[in-house]
Image: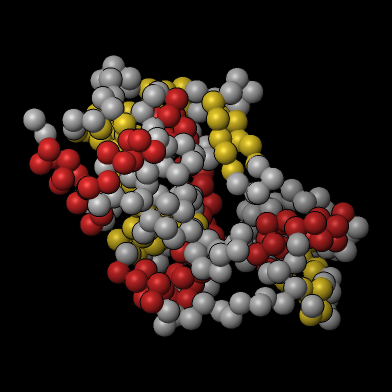
Amino acid sequence: MKTQNQVQFIDISDDEAGQRIDNFLLAKLKGVPKSMIYRIIRKGEVRVNKGRIKPEYKLIAGDQVRVPPVRVAEREEAPVSAKLDKVSALADCILYEDDAILVINKPSGTAVHGGSGLSFGVIEGLRALRPEARFLELVHRLDRDTSGILLVAKKRSALRALHEQLRLKQMQKDYLALVRGHWQSHTKVIQAPLLKNILQSGERVVRVSPEGKPSETRFKVEERFDNATLVKASPVTGRTHQIRVHTLHAGHPIAFDNRYGDKQFDSQLADTGLKRLFLHASALKFTHPKTGEEMRLQAPLDKELNQCLKVLRSRKN
């Protein structure tokens, strides 16, 4: 353990304003447990403009934050090197970048951030790739095995504006999923409440339950095959594993879903070369946080998904 010995006084800039004090401290005090952050706030050791505050206090530009000395767990992992193959590969995945946002076509199998035993995630990789960028934060997330469009903010003001679009459901996300069987054309919307359970192993499992949170996904058939359907899924809400559980609820689990899938269906696709979850965030529509321009970005399918579709098309009657 190492101790930050001195009291720090931090002046809040325009770009840092608007975030909660607890989230601000979590980002500033890397390696400090969340429980300790809340303890030092509750005990009044953290002060804003010399006064006590609550964890939900939202910072204002010009605020002065007093941060007490804290013990920080030293990180055992070395920083992610920009020379790592994974980091270099991320550079080829960037779809769009300007001074406010960065958009990447995330590969399947890569987590969006490290943690839970993973030292490498997309955000750590991007920070290693862009060491000069003072601020890089995920706007939203994708499951580790899901590929496709991931939006990253390069300024706090951009992050706030994009989070507001998400909150007001003004951002449209479209996914492509290969599902079992013949999806019925009249199934255009699934509204089924989702309840998240954390197993003892720490694994998250989601199921449809009346006690769950309201969840809605819109569906459209893109292409039909002998024993499968390629559907476009557009989530209206953003629950954990939402598309994966809603397709299962409709009786059409997604190909190679190791948590909600169907092994027999997966075996029927063995000769297509598919070995990963066939769920891809293919398009994202949003308003640019700086220019106000409406943007629609698309992420192409990777070789494995394209090859799978090619084989299925060749089998069509």
| Residue 62 lies in quadrant | bottom right
Quarter placement of the C terminus: top left
Q: Is residue 88 left or right of residue 303?
A: right
Q: Which is more toward the observer, 228 or 289? A: 228
Position of residue 139 measured from the top left corner of the image (x, y, whole percent): 49, 53
Q: Which is more toward the observer, 175 or 70? A: 175
Position of residue 140 measured from the top left corner of the image (x, y, whole percent): 48, 50
Q: Which is more toward the observer, 150 or 222? A: 222
* Residue 153 visible from this viewpoint: no
Q: Residue at x 16, y 45 (%)?
A: 311
Position of residue 118 measured from the top left corner of the image (x, y, whole percent): 56, 64
Q: Is residue 226 left or right of residue 122?
A: left
* Residue most extreme to the top: 186
Position of residue 218 measured from the top left corner of the image (x, y, whole percent): 36, 28
Quarter placement of the N terminus: bottom right
Q: Residue at x 36, y 59 (%)?
A: 107
Q: Is residue 132 left or right of residue 4?
A: left
Query: Where 91 sits versus 143, above or below?
Result: below
Query: Where 94 sits versus 210, above or below?
Result: below
| Residue 247 lies in quadrant | top left
Q: Residue at x 72, y 77 (%)?
A: 74
